[in-house]
Amino acid sequence: MKETLSLGRIAGVRVGLHWSVLVIIVLVAVVLARGRLPAAHPGHPAWAYWVAALLTSLVFLASLLAHELAHAVVARRNGVQVEGITLWMLGGAARLRTEAPTPGAELRIAVVGPLTSLVAGGVCTGLAVGLDALHVSGLVVEAVAWLAAINIVLAVFNALPAAPLDGGRLLRSFLWHRTGDRVRATRGASAAGRALGWLLVGGGFAAVLFAGNLSGLWSALIGWFLISTATAEARQAELRSALHGVPVSRVMTWAPVTVPAAMTIARFLADAPFDRFRHSAFPVLAPDGGVAGLVTAGAVRDVPPDARPTTTIGQVMRPLSDIETAAPGDMVVDLLPRLQESRERRALVLDAGRLVGIVTLADISRVVTWLTGAPRREG
């Protein structure tokens, strides 16, 4: 899930919002402003309900962010690289570049999320009781009480032993500790996640069909998300298992065709050896021979024909700072998540700053096909 709007860094972790986060804000605001708040405290003007509802939805988002930040901070303390956090329609997701090194680390990273939500629920509960004792507006007390309840519900739901929920991570850490097999543990947690997902989908559609309760659609949507994500996690675990111990040097294309940064687009199109090399991206070299960036077929195509004789490759390339890089000795399993998140889906391979190769997701897929098809040695 890629971010639409960056919020910068919090506690050293990159935080962003996906456009679908607006769904959470609108949904929570409508439920509170048109339902819970007027029902609990009638007689207020409509604008008062909407202001309270919108502020409550924003605080709810902040609690989701706190939940994911807790995961990210503990993950870093346990040696796991964190790419960032993205809040979206169904909550939030902390993107981890690497996996927990031990079952104990997996447990610590997983358990801190529900604990954070539980603490937030407890704090809001105490705050609601205190505000009520001080005879603060009933709307404020009701909004804080709702935040207390929803955070406690989130803590309980996330603790269910099913991937990709935090409880699924706890289940995986237990199975990993017991069997010593990370992949087998992931399969077990993913199977539990799919089972819970189908239960939610079935229950949601049953609520719509037999009770006319449209909120069942939300349950079905969450169930579908659990099924698809749990399935993807199982596949990712199988992929990482197949690629375990494989260095980038065994996957990459050595000595890739390069393009000078000073070459014009027109000259590139006229001279590029498309009959022999059918690449869709080329590394770009600076005048001193160093790597300057990467130029793609799309970037070249976007240059108007009349501007191509005067536009250079260096003007349309993506600079090296925006491109994923790797060393020949890096492990493919560590590079893979970065490639999947990157825009170009490829990385330049550098050895002491010198370009030696290029690796793409297609290269990795081909290697996985061979590795999974090769017979396993016994003994």
Image: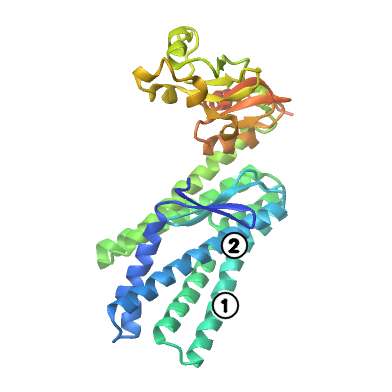
Give x and y (percent) for residue 233: 54, 44
In space, the residues marked 2 and 1 are separated at their CA atoms by: 15 Å
Dot 2 falls on a residue whose secondary structure is: helix
| Rendered image coloring scheme | rainbow
In the image, residue 317 above or below residue 2: above
Q: Where is residue 122 in the image (x, y as percent from the top left)?
A: 57, 77
Quadrant of the image for the C terminus? top right
Badge 1 element:
helix
Residue at screen point 47% across, 7% down: 271
Mark 2 nearby-residue class (10 Å; few <14, some 14–19, many ≥20): many
Q: Is residue 72 visible?
A: yes
Q: Which of 147 and 353 is in front in this view?
A: 353
The residue beneath circle 1 is 123
State which mark lies toward you, 2 or 1.
1
To which residue does mark 2 refer?
113
The amino acid sitting under disc 1 is Val
> Against 37, is 92 above or below?
above
Going by the image, does 365 lie left or right of 378? left
Reply above or below: 64 against 274: below
